[in-house]
Amino acid sequence: MPVQPTPYIWMDGDLVEWDQANVHIMTHALHYGFGAFEGIRAYETERGLAIFRLREHVRRLMNSAKILMLDMPYSEDEICAAHVELMRANNMGPGTYIRPLVYTGYGETGIFPLTSPVRLAIATWTWGAYLGEEGAAKGARLMTSSWRRHDSNAMPTAAKATGMYINSGLAKVEALRAGFDEALMLGPDGRISECSGENIFIIRGGVLITPSPSEAGALAGITQDSIIRIARDLGYEVRHEAMIRTDIYLADECFMTGTAAEVIPVASLDDRLVGNGEPGPITRELQARYSQSVRGQVPGYDDWLTYCN
Ligand code: PPE
């Protein structure tokens, strides 16, 4: 579905009208994929709209820029303030998704990226259920992709870099064309890394298991981190462990986490039902608790929210 325009896009310090927010065709990042982005959500709370874990997202954006050796032209505080400014200017409401993007702009041409100006833009739009309402409610059907996730010595897997998403895009197309909802990606060693845009958890004997992002070459998900904290606060044991695909076939429960996806149960992998194929009770509990926490309805997680009013 096309994005519904919102009034403004923040571009290099200015609020630019949506239709005017263009770049030149000679923009370096367009040719070589040299950029990094974030996906952030904002939720309605009793105290008004709040951005979920804004500082952690901005920090990860700064870290991605550092890995790419891009000289971020703004400080962490300035970028956080720009997000709030744009949220207010666009008068955003529930279901808001925020996309900051740092990239090499129009300057010199050629692979060497560091002579291009570094640009920063932020867009907001309303984004509903990532894999559809049905995915969130009934669970997603996954397939193991024939595309391997990046080797972290070929692509810096700790960075959320734009060009790296060719890999996710190929896997997603393969999965959807084969009639599935999402792709599970293995790392170069054959162990489970992550999905095209989500981290993965299984539950076995009441214990939550998720691959360590560094070991699995997966993005260190902020939702993954939030779920680990929520699960531990609820008294569950959570472990970082390497996983192979049969661990999912034989798990009691399985779910994916991501900012856009939030918490989505996994119904099956490669046509093997996970459990009985229905979202499991712990997945349901965590899904509900996450949904309440991001909306400021659970005491103890207030440090996660940046209020926009
Ligand atoms: N792995 C990948 C590859 C990934 O892109 C994301 C986020 C995650 C894990 C989860 O990270 P986090 O959002 O911090 O919990 N994917 C973003 C992009 C989605 C898109 O289609 O674009 C997102 O969820 O915003």
Image (cartoon, grey):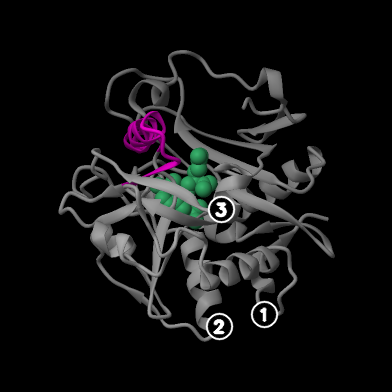
- Residue 260 in view: no
Q: Name the residue under label 1.
A: 300
Q: Is residue 286 left or right of residue 114?
A: right
Residue occupied by mark 2: 233
Region rendered in magenta: 162-184
* Residue 173 among magenta residues: yes
Percent position of residue 99, x then y: 58, 40
Residue 38, placed above or below residue 211: above
Tell me if residue 143 can be seen: yes
Residue 73 vs residue 215, the one in the foreground: 215
Question: In the image shown, does 132 or 303 lie closer to the viewer?
Answer: 132
Q: In which quarter of the image is the N terminus?
A: top right
Q: Which residue is outermost to the left?
A: 189
Sequence-earlier tag: 3 or 1: 3
Q: Circles 3 and 1: CB distance less than 8 Å?
A: no
Q: Which residue is drawn at 66% across and 63% down?
A: 291
State which quadrant residue 54 falls in: bottom right
Q: Do the residues labelled 2 and 1 touch (CB within 8 Å)?
A: yes
Picture coordinates of residue 244, whole percent (x, y): 23, 60
Query: Looking at the magenta stretch, what is its main secondary structure?
Result: helix
Q: What element carries label 2?
A: helix
Q: In this view, does 50 lie to the left or right of 266?
A: right
Give the CA separation, mark 3 to mark 2. Answer: 26 Å
Question: Residue at left 72%, top 55%?
Answer: 43
Q: At label 2, which amino acid type do we have?
A: Asp
Q: Please state the horizontal and vertical placement of residue 309, each as a whole percent of the image.
A: 83, 55
Which callout, 2 or 1, points at the residue further toward the start of the chain? 2
Mark 3 neighbour density, 10 Å: few (under 14) some (14–19) many (20 or more): some
Is 110 inside the magenta-drawn segment?
A: no
Frontmost residue, 69 versus 248: 248
